[in-house]
Amino acid sequence: MNTSTIRQKLYEYIRVADDKKVKAIYAIIESDMDGLYEWWKDKDLIAELNSCSANLKSGEDKGSSWEEVKDELLNSRETSTQNGL
């Protein structure tokens, strides 16, 4: 079973599970949840994103189209494959 299917089954189960089962599931995963990175609270990251966004809007950074990024990734992949990586 793939991860997407598992996520959907868990979501459906938790939606209708009784309180005792929901609390038990939460107790199992609570410590993992505490370690999640909340990027939207990272002031340095938000400042960097705002700066990048402003540079794109002003034209200082021309950015890259999806086609350019895709071509670069595909070329990189081909080069890596040819080099045995």
Image (spheres, rainbow, N blue to C red):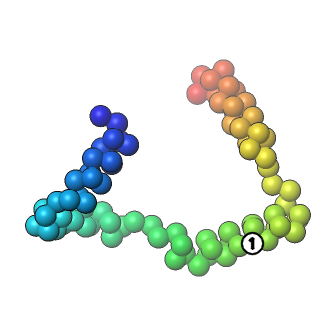
In this view, the residue farthest toward the right is 59
Crowding at mark 1 (Cα within 10 Å: few <14, some 14-19, many 20+): few
Q: Is residue 64 above or below residue 34?
A: above
Residue 5 at x, y percent in the picture:
33, 41
Residue 9 at x, y percent in the picture:
27, 47
Residue sitting at x 81%, y 54%: 63
Q: Quadrant of the N terminus?
A: top left
Q: Is residue 72 above or below residue 26?
A: above
Residue sitting at x 87%, y 69%: 58
Q: Nearer the viewer, residue 57 or 17?
A: 17
The image quadrant of residue 33 is bottom left
Q: Nearer the viewer, residue 36 or 19?
A: 19
In this view, the residue farthest toward the front is 16
- Residue to which mark 1 is pinned: 51
Residue sitting at x 86%, y 56%: 62
Residue 37 at x, y percent in the picture:
45, 67
Amino acid type at image mark 1:
Ser
Q: Secondary structure at mark 1?
A: helix
The image quadrant of residue 42 is bottom right
Q: Nearer the viewer, residue 55 or 21?
A: 21
Residue 83 appears in the rendering:
no
Left or right: 44 in relation to 72: left
In this view, the residue farthest toward the left is 20
Left or right: 62 in relation to 3: right
Left or right: 30 in relation to 84: left
Q: How many marks?
A: 1
Q: Quadrant of the C terminus?
A: top right
Q: Nearer the viewer, residue 61 or 13?
A: 13
Residue 80 appears in the rendering:
yes
Residue sitting at x 59%, y 79%: 43
The image quadrant of residue 6 is top left
